[in-house]
Amino acid sequence: MVLEKPIVIDCRDHLHGRLCSVVAKELLAGQKIVLVRCEDMVISGSLVRNQTKYAQFRKKRMNTNPTRGPFHFKSPARMVWRTIRGMVHQKSARGQAAIGRLSTFEGIPHPYDKVKRKVIPAALRVVRLKPGRKYTKMGDLANNVGWKHQELVSSLEDKRRAKAEVFFQKKKAAAALKAKAEEAAAGDLAKVNEVLAAAGH
């Protein structure tokens, strides 16, 4: 990955730990990364198993004053953020700078719905998890531990998908018209194309 503009990664159907480790490495290298659709990320193992593990994690607290931490986040985006924080050595200045380059979101909010989104093949469930194995969606796990916005995010995603479909159909129609126009003008453009080809275009 080249360290230029922020890279937007669509987390849908990626394995949690594998995606986070790749992202942590890139953050430490200086790349800005935005993770969208964190609620569709998956963890291997059944929902019951992951609920039990998360319940044990939630029991870990400061004995005398629990308000001092450790803090257990309930939203998928913050769960992912916390996992990555544990991979970048956040108590050093370098780690703090790295975690500052990360943004995590449920759904795909406004600026990023018009941006090209990438996947990480090495972290995809279909590549890494044996068919038939159980897995858990982060959104379902978060919903069971007290996240209250699963339905809201789902409805907003439905709206976004409907808008994207309209845009895509318009784009397809425009591309078809352009191809038709080029075909109609092919005879007239033959000489022009020859000149352009000679010039290396």
Image (cartoon, helix red, strand yellow):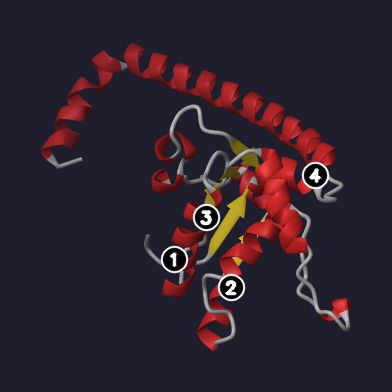
Q: Amino acid at mark 2?
A: Ile
For numbered disc 3, what is the local secondary structure?
helix
Question: In this picture, is 15 found above or below 160?
Answer: below
Q: Amino acid at mark 1?
A: Glu
Q: Amino acid at mark 4?
A: Asn
For numbered disc 4, what is the local secondary structure?
helix
Q: Are marks 2 and 1 in contact (CB under 8 Å)?
A: no
Q: Quadrant of the N terminus?
A: bottom left
Residue for badge 3: 17
- Closer to viewer: mark 3 or mark 2: 3
Residue for badge 2: 99
Q: Position of residue 54 (x, y in %)?
A: 72, 55
Label 1 neighbourhood size at 10 Å, few (<14), some (14-19), many (20+)? some
Q: Are marks 3 and 2 in contact (CB under 8 Å)?
A: no
Q: Are marks 1 and 4 in contact (CB under 8 Å)?
A: no
Label 3 neighbourhood size at 10 Å, few (<14), some (14-19), many (20+)? some
Q: Are marks 1 and 3 in contact (CB under 8 Å)?
A: no
Question: Which callout, 2 or 1, points at the residue further toward the start of the chain?
Answer: 1
Q: Which disc is residue 143 wearing? A: 4
- Closer to viewer: mark 4 or mark 2: 4
For numbered disc 1, what is the local secondary structure?
helix
Residue for badge 1: 26
Q: CA distance from mark 1 to mark 3?
A: 15 Å
Q: Which residue is rendered at x = 57% and y = 34% of the image?
A: 134
